[in-house]
Image: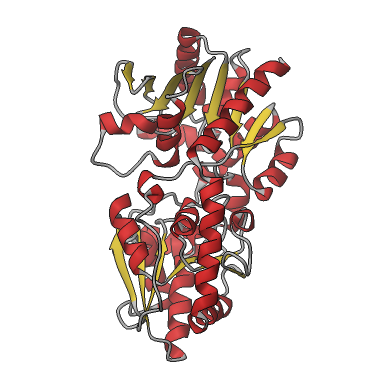
Amino acid sequence: MKILWLTNNPSYAIEKLSPETQSGGWLKALNYHLAENQDIELNVCFYWSVALEPFEFHNTMYYPVTEVKPKSMKDKLVAKVSGSQNDHLSIQKIKAIVDKVKPDLIHVHGTELNLGLIQFETSVPVVISIQGILSPYYEKYFSGIPEAILKKTKKSGLSFSKGINSAFRLNAVRERNILKSAQFIIGRTDWDKRMTRLLAPNSQYFVGNEILREAFYDTKNIWKKTSFEQPLKLITTTGNVAYKGFELIVKTATLLRQYDVEFEWSVVGLNENNSIPKAVENWLEPNYKEIGVQFLGIKNETELVALLLQSDIYCQVSHIENSPNSLCEAMMLGMPIAATNVGGTSSMLENNHEGILVQEGEPYDLAGAIVALQNDFEKAKVYGENARKTALLRHDPKKVVDEITKTYYSILEKL
């Protein structure tokens, strides 16, 4: 069976192209394991910033493609006004790869980019994996930080990562167009299944879970504390995006300080000069040091595992998610967890059994959950143990590869 992936990153080939970077994520892991299946001939077409010739690496053929984007200011302005994003030019490049590879099945990873448009250019069956979904994300973008604050921060000259703008809205429109015609969908949560029953009404839905990063499977990496530390060590992994809920950390930390809870809150993935912390600083005027928030920046998986194992409670604070890898990683380690009940999170973690789910954007509820866990270490530990059992089953590499492989065969048998 010849499979062609369309992805937004090089998957396992990042080990060849840029081994020092921390990208690739779960696609990298799935690529590695799926390529070892003797019944599958795996090919990966991905967007890359510079032109490269196709190459083979770890039982996989890779086809880098440069995305066509407006270059001149005039072209950018025309694209912004007209809504044209040069998608047709990029997709023709991908179509050429499809014609060259002649796959039995095309697997598109994600709907955020234009890759799913390939379904309109080929008779080869296409299955689309859901990562995030832009339309509901757009609805929640300003749930935490007001739009005026974000725009003010952007105008100050700071780099505003993935800001809400015309491109985001246009991408959401394109995504709805892609999903409306989709025949086959792979998802993993009740939330993305509900979303696709609406947005992709004629599609068949399959379940396909994710493989986590290698370090999280090491049997030495298990949370084994016998008591919480003083001060309490909280940790969150997040990104420089408004809907990831950084302001909830600040509000909750401020509240905990007012009620004399001693803690340190480590934030991985951000530094103090990123646009979102700057926007929150302009808005709420926190003194990060005084409220116990410390920025650790981007960490590789080994460094992250060490930090998580040293911490007491993992806190997820997002306003919208589908199946957050950061939450799944904390579950895999067996950590006590407090998480906002958003999107597909409740499919990942069972409330009052594997952790505590709280109202998104609400600092009193999150602060209360943190205190509840702190006040009952034995219960918190059991929650973590339960979470680890679930994660080990859900993210078992063999199980995930079997799920994907069975989906591929099931689709081809229907045609």
Q: Position of residue 212 (x, y in %)?
A: 44, 45
Which residue is located at x 55 percent, y 68 percent?
383
> Does residue 317 appear in this view?
no
Which residue is located at x 39 percent, y 71 percent?
225
For the residue pair 37 and 31, the one nearer the viewer reads as: 37
For the residue pair 88 and 176, the one nearer the viewer reads as: 176
Image position of 130 (left or right of 253):
right
Q: Quadrant of residue 42?
A: top left
Residue 302 higher or lower than 234, as above or below: above
Q: Quadrant of the C terminus?
A: top right
Image position of 224 (left or right of 255):
left
Protein image colouring: secondary structure
Which residue is located at x 46 percent, y 22 percent?
90
For the residue pair 203 and 143, the one nearer the viewer reads as: 203
> Does residue 366 appear in this view?
yes
Outermost residue to the left: 20
Q: Number of labelled discs?
A: 0
Q: Position of residue 95 (x, y in %)?
A: 50, 14
Residue 171 higher or lower than 127, as above or below: below
Which residue is located at x 63 percent, y 18 percent?
125
Q: Position of residue 10 (x, y in %)?
A: 37, 30
Image position of 107 (left or right of 271):
right
For the residue pair 289 and 68, the one nearer the viewer reads as: 289
Q: Quadrant of residue 284?
A: bottom left
Residue 384 higher or lower than 376, as above or below: above
Residue 231 higher or lower than 18, as above or below: below
Q: Quadrant of the N terminus?
A: top right
Q: Position of residue 248 (x, y in %)?
A: 49, 71
